[in-house]
Image: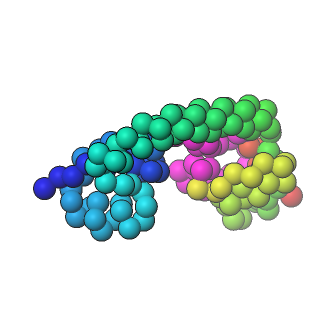
């Protein structure tokens, strides 16, 4: 049996804040409602939803504008990470998203390491383009140079 709920927060693979979605009753009862990720879509909540929808749209636009301004700042940066390397240009360790997060923090930008997308750790010297997912719709690319110590 399916029920309709109004999402209070973005839920991956389900919907964004303010969406009215149909989900299985158990998923709503055991996961969405106890965590306050959604409310039941009854008559009273649907009336309140119209007001909340305009607020959610405003918040979404504001978050997107903040992400776009952060994107400009991130793409203007060139990060340099020093690492121990052998004679052939291979690193003794590797450069991970934690190292990129630390370098961004030194430049004054606070970005979570989960948003820094490295498919695999960097294990060689050189220049790399590292994608950073700032928002659901906004992705920036930071230039990273790995040099020898």
Q: Is residue 130 magenta?
A: yes
Image x and y of residue 86, in percent: 76, 60
Evaluate whether residue 127 shows in this view: no
Q: Residue at x 72, y 33 (%)?
A: 69
In this rendering, would 28 be left or right of 65? left
Task: State the image quarter where residue 26 is shown.
Answer: bottom left
Task: State the image quarter where residue 129 is shown.
Answer: top right
Relative depth, front residue between 80 and 101: 101
Relative depth, front residue between 33 and 125: 33
In this rendering, would 143 be left or right of 107? left
Task: State the image quarter where residue 18 is shown.
Answer: top left
Q: Is residue 71 magenta?
A: no
Relative depth, front residue between 98 and 110: 110
Magenta stretch: give its range: 115-143
Relative depth, front residue between 48 and 86: 48
Q: Residue at x 36, y 55 (%)?
A: 39
Image x and y of residue 43, in percent: 29, 45
In this rendering, would 28 be left or right of 57? left
- Residue farthest along the left direction in this orientation: 1
Evaluate whether residue 146 shows in this view: yes
């Amino acid at each position: 049996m399916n029920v309709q709920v109004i999402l209070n927060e973005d839920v991956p693979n389900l919907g964004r804040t303010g969406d009215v979605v149909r989900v299985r009753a158990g998923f709503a009862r055991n996961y969405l409602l106890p965590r306050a990720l959604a409310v039941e879509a009854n008559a009273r909540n649907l009336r309140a939803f119209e007001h909340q929808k305009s607020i959610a749209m405003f918040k979404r636009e504001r978050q997107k504008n903040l992400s776009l301004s952060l994107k400009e700042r991130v793409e203007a940066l060139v990060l340099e990470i020093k690492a121990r390397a052998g004679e052939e240009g291979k690193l003794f360790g590797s450069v991970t998203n934690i190292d990129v997060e630390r370098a961004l923090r030194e430049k004054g930008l606070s970005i979570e390491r989960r948003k820094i997308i490295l498919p695999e750790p960097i294990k060689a010297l050189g220049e790399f383009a590292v994608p950073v997912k700032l928002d659901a719709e906004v992705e920036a690319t930071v230039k990273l140079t790995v040099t020898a110590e």
